[in-house]
Image (cartoon, grey):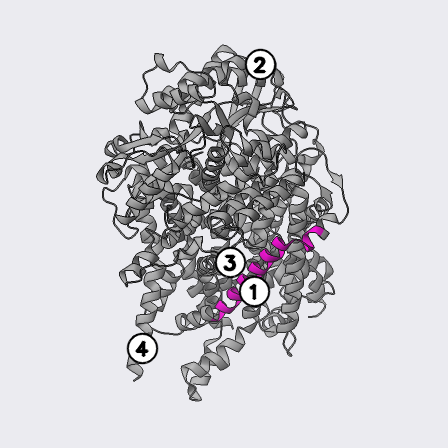
Amino acid sequence: MRRIGYILLYVALGLVGVFQIFPIIWLFMFSLKTNQEIFAGNPFALPTDPKWENYLKVFEGGIGTYFWNSIWITVVATVLTILVASMATFAITRMKWKFSGLVLGLIMVGLMIPIHSALIPLYNMFLNVNLIDNPISIVITYATYNLPITVMILLGFYTTIPREIEEAAIIDGSSIHRLFFRIIMPISAPIMSTTVIINMIYNWNEFVFVNTFISSDKFKTLTVGVQNFIGQYMTDWGAIGATLVISVLPIIIAFLFFSDKIMEGLSASAVKG
Amino acid sequence: MNKVMSNKWIIFLYTFPALLLIGVLIVVPLILSGYFGLMDWDGIGAMEFIGLENYITALQDSKFWESALHSFLLALFSALSLIAYLAVALILASKIKGANLLRKIYLIPMLLSSVAIAQLWIKIYNPSNGMLNSILRGLGIENPPTWLADPNIVLFAIFIPIIWQYAGFYILIYYAALKNIPESLIEAAKIDGATPLQIALKIKVPLIMNVFKVTIVLSIVGSLKYFDLIYVMTSGGPNGASEVMASYMYKLAFASYDFGYGSAIGFLLLIITLIVTVIIQKLTASKDKIQY
Amino acid sequence: MFKKKAIAVFGIFLLSVFLLAACGGGENESGSSESSSGDGDKTVKFMHLWPEGSSAQHHKVVNEIIADFEAENEDTTIELEVLSNEQYKDKIKVLSTSDELPDVGMTWAAGYMQPYVDGNMYAALDDVINKDDFVSGTTEAFSVDDTTYGLPLELNISSIFYNKAIFDEYGLEAPETIEELNEIVATLKENGVNPIALGNKDAWTGSMWYMYLANRLAGDEDVLTQAINREISFEDPALVGAAEEVQKLVDADSFVSGFNGLADEEAKSMFMGEQAAMYLIATWDLPNFTTNEDVPQEFRDKVGYFKFPTVDGNGNTNNYVGGPGVGLFVAENSDVKEEAKNFASYFVEQWGERAVTDVGIIPATKVDAGSLDLPQMYVDVLDDLNAAENITLYADVQMSAEDAQVHLDMIQALFGGEVTPEDFAKAHEEALEQE
């Protein structure tokens, strides 16, 4: 009886798994097809005559600079967000002060702003401080717009940290910085890895801000590479597919790496918690 | 202890960076957009102050309320789907074989950009050559629905990819939270003879309740301002059948040159979201006081 | 311990640097972001929407023209920014709110550019334009109160393209009347062939059908334009009748299934994948049916086109629905307005012949087709253009942006059977009357 239950469970899990992995396989096939096959052909069909030249087109389009920009902007913005968000969450949840609720409320308002409302005011502000067409505008915008969600995710975790941990540390004569950096941050590694993944995905795939604030090719990111193949009347979908495949690879690698970090964090917190 | 943990200077140091960023890059634009909402402005040339006229118009604008209804429906479905994600996370976080691999596979769709996801689902829903209708015809259904073209179906057809797109996100959060539960608690329950289901419902779920509440807020707020896939897949059509608040706002501000009115809608979107969030927090506040 | 503290300090330092950079810049706010340096060199910013990846030929010709211009004007540099269509529109919108338009950029005609002209964003170009060089009607579409604000680059007219092989298979011939078209549709349906590809998610595609039907029903009067200009009511019999005709076509299953959810791109692919026999589109797609090497030769050979048929014996097939696509504007507040104007006019001059020979689009400037080696379909289209008696400008271009939204929504509703022809006309009348 129990065995049948397990078998059924695995069948169900496996089916969902197939459904979840299908998009990547589909995307790869998509990248090897012509517009005709993509739109009018059988969507399950393998490409009849794989168009590897789609990838060639993408590399000829000068994707290298975009690639590098995507990487460093993603990394810097993610580090900035995680650091600032962790500090703020620590102060809000672990320290005692009157306005913590208010500050949290303010951060939460940041969750609610539709980006198209913010776009024009932001452009105007960056223009006034000469940050248009400067990657700093992108980095701080990404960092800021990810802050609220990062704080929210950390929050649920920080509230569950037992008080005793802090008390023990403080009684041992530890400073608050030491408490934060040496104790709280390490035990929050699993949730931090989670927020790193989420931040990376967002930063990596963002294009509204980068399109609006950046005009020089040398500062543009990979999402702009996709735009390169969208024409006034015609779009080269196969090449877009190839760009999407190339741009999803680094994020998959990073994801696999950080996703194992969640497991490592487990052992760390199991010892201390 | 208390003295150390309420050191004003430290609190300032730890919260100031976040407040500065949010204050300058979110709150100021927000106030500005509320201010633009008081203007008759096409985004080009001079503005004219018209007081609350845009806001009053919006409150009487049936298209706005229709789009708001769609946004609320999306929020409702997104929130309900959290239960399913929690169930999946519970399974993945339990010690079944292959959980680690499954977890990685399950999160893959989350890594794709909206452009890719939109293209995938456009191909799934295509009425003539789409994957879904190919399967349905294979099953002998003569006239399968036209999905994105049918005003009665389109809204729900488009909810599915949106909810699916975020599945990985929530499963990831629940998974991390579940993994954070000390093993000792679970071992103790096992010794007391609790079944896996009992452990899940009586120990694990209550322990991650705080996280669950946060995700309710995240999913509802995210749904109310949702834009991406709707814009790419249907542009809110046919004839407004899948319009949501954010896409309506975008259309007004960027396509109809009614920037003042669009800003007002954007600001109302924020107010509505704010009210909903406060209500949810009141509803989910438990007896044992949440620390924040 | 010390190390970690150092990281914290460093982190905060990093942040402060970012923010100082942000705020510090504020002090030299007056430092213009227009990049014109002191030594007499002028930089003209030019934005266009033909990315290399999707529009290789356009992109190449643009770059060649820029290179030639820079060679002839050594003190002027052209700084280029290329965006895709939608991104371009959004970005221009944002730039205009801060009065930061590029020195030279692309604009659409009539309704699209009206707010920019009203807001004094576009420079008058009468001093650099020679109207005789342009096909009549094109510069007018870029004019407000007899002043020209845009230099048109392309001209498109719509026709119904069809698959000759499919027509031959069922013994069909290009129709001249809507009745013949209906019979063709019926025959194709009987044989399980999709008659007409239509991607009405974008709605301007359905609008072309509606506009042609209205044009044919009204005979030689351009009722749609008159209604938009408020000379007549939108509840004119021809405009209501055209809506009825649309629904007749829909009821006869003339269009592919689920057209209201399909993008034009998907419909085009159905036509090009020989899954549908007909497709109403403008001449910008000519390369796909003639010279585009990415499209199988076999298919290109099968494509023919016919003029939109007459309706109930009414209509003049020398009337077209179409219009100039994009044109060049020069920003009114440009620091290098003279250079920008020179560049824009140079560009248009150079563009004409190369547009048709190298890029495969019909330019708005007059072209002597006889002297060029062109595919037959181009020759035919250019002949049609020469014989054209009237071109009704696309409704969503003619109307103000706000009315265009109403029009596009109503078109979807009309094709979807959600609105009666009377209510369709009424909604237009109300929207147009509000101005």
Callout 3 and callout 1 share a chain? yes
Task: Decide if residue C107 is on the left or right side of residue A171.
Answer: left
Query: Residue A34: x, y in percent?
Result: 30, 40
Q: Which residue is mark 2?
A: C128
- Please report the residue visible at 27 percent of the width from the left and 60 percent of the height from the top: B138
Which label was assigned to residue A6?
Answer: 4
Q: Start and end of the magenta stretch? A: B57-83
Looking at the image, residue C124 lies above or below residue B149: above
C-alpha separation, residue under disc 3 versus residue under disc 1:
15 Å
Looking at the image, residue B249 lies above or below residue B79: above
Callout 4 and callout 3 share a chain? yes
Q: Give the residue at the far front of this rendering.
A: C313
Mark 2 neighbour density, 10 Å: few (under 14) some (14–19) many (20 or more)? some
Q: Chain of mark 2?
A: C
Three-letter code for the amino acid on which mark 4 is drawn: Tyr
Three-letter code for the amino acid on which mark 1 is drawn: Ile
Q: Which residue is mark 1?
A: A184
Q: Chain of mark 3?
A: A
- Please report the residue visible at 34 percent of the width from the left and 14 percent of the height from the top: C372
Q: Which residue is mark 3?
A: A195
